[in-house]
Image (cartoon, rainbow, N blue to C red):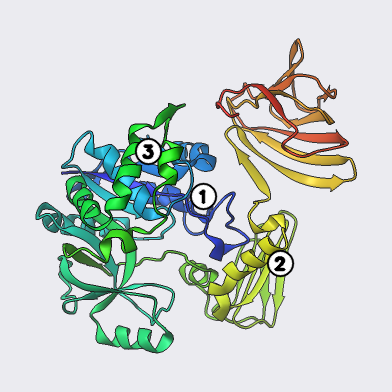
Amino acid sequence: MIITPVILCGGSGTRLWPLSRKSYPKQFTRLTGAGTLFQQSAQRLSGCDAGVSFSAPLVVTNGDFRFVVAEQLAEVGIDPGPILIEPEGRNTAPAVLAAAVYLAARDPQAVMLVAPSDHVIPDAAAFRAAVAAGMAAVEAGRIVTFGINPDRPETGYGYLQLSARPDGSGAAMALTRFVEKPDATRAAQMLADGSYLWNSGIFLFRVADILAAFTAHAPGLMAPVQAAVAQAKTDLGFLRLAPEPWAQAEDISIDYAVMEKSDRLSVVPFAAGWSDLGGWDAVWREAGPDDRGVVTSDNATAIDCDGTLLRSKSEGLELVGIGLKDIIAVAMPDAVLVAHMDRAQDVKKAVEALKAKRAKQAQIFPRDFRPWGWFESLAVGDRFQVKRIVVNPGGALSLQSHHHRSEHWIVVQGTAKVTVDDTVRLVTENQSVYIPLGAVHRMENPGKLPMVLIEVQTGSYLGEDDIIRYDDIYARD
């Protein structure tokens, strides 16, 4: 049986702020191991192993991330299947249903494996073996979820209560009920009981069976989601779900909409290691603390510290901790987080506080990723701004002009093909070009390596909305 992986990657990951933000969430960053969390998820759900074969992944994401998804899959040599673009986030139930409706038109008996894109599962072979173990239940018409054997009384996860303790065989077991995130006392009791597993949020089922479950338990979602898929438009290889019917779909998780109401759920116990990296304490744990419980990044130094995470992601910034105990310190170019390890789940409160004061750091990542590459501001002052711009091989900015600013480009790596009004020329390293206010211009990278340049903007207004686009290979407005 060939399984279609459905990878959900539209979340914002606010508990890993300031590294993870709405404009560039944690699934697209390198936190543990090789590659990003999204890339690790796609690789884990590819190929053939342990008796299961995976087709190309179906990805559900939003418009802002569509090119990131395609680029990161290409980096690891995975050809994507359909990439469904949500007009807006409506939680996991509509996303899963949209994938099922799309697949049903091709094969109602197809098997789907639904997985978030930001989980860490170090032993991919063991996970694929667990998927194989769940197939017997799927073939019997069951909806399978994967329960993680707990190794501590965790209060940040929901739990699954089984009908009995797992027997170690790995076979699917009957689910008694879902349990909400407990307090510390109750979590300790459930750990001691042995029949409770963490809810991983990973599911395996046939398309026909999940559609029947939605029809029975969340019928209000069916019409808007079916219409959104039926009216979807193809856009540069992506499939944009129709926004009007999509907006009518309830914002609800798959657990609340279907899973907690269904009597056809089975659980495959999984004991080979898993984390949803739902907080900096989880990152600290997965990174493998030293004998004093300390984890540091390349640009961080710990002196006489215990139980501490020091992480610097800012070029030229060295983070040093002295005499710290149970502390999280994360430094980015535009924001620094310092928190007690016990308050890791409260980091999202920092995001809300910054949003309330309208600080851009709440949601906007220092690097602005675009279909052609990325840019970041190096210096901003009265009537000027300096940016570093990186254009991927074959990438091209839109043909555009500005009402309020002129620009000066200096190439520091690679070669740029530059259009200014009717003139087109190549600009190589250590050469520059001036873009007068109002000139119609474009920058392209015709080479096979990334092209890097420094842009100096001057003018009365320097906002990103001062752009008139005349042509764009990425079909942006």
Quadrant that contains the C terminus: top right
Residue at numbered disc 1: 28
Horizontal side of 378 relative to 281 (left or right) equals right
Residue at numbered disc 2: 319
Q: Can you tell which of label 3 and label 1 is closer to the viewer?
A: 3
User: Residue 465, how many percent across, how many down?
Assistant: 72, 36
Q: Label 3 is placed on what type of residue?
A: Ala
Q: Can you tell which of label 3 and label 2 is closer to the viewer?
A: 3
Q: Residue furthest right?
A: 382
Horizontal side of 9 relative to 15 (left or right) equals left
Residue at numbered disc 3: 228
Q: Are marks 2 and 1 in contact (CB under 8 Å)?
A: no
> Does residue 80 sit above or below 130 in this rendering?
above
Tell me the SS state at disc 1. Answer: helix
Q: Label 1 is placed on what type of residue?
A: Phe
User: Residue 235, how many percent across, how many down?
Assistant: 46, 28
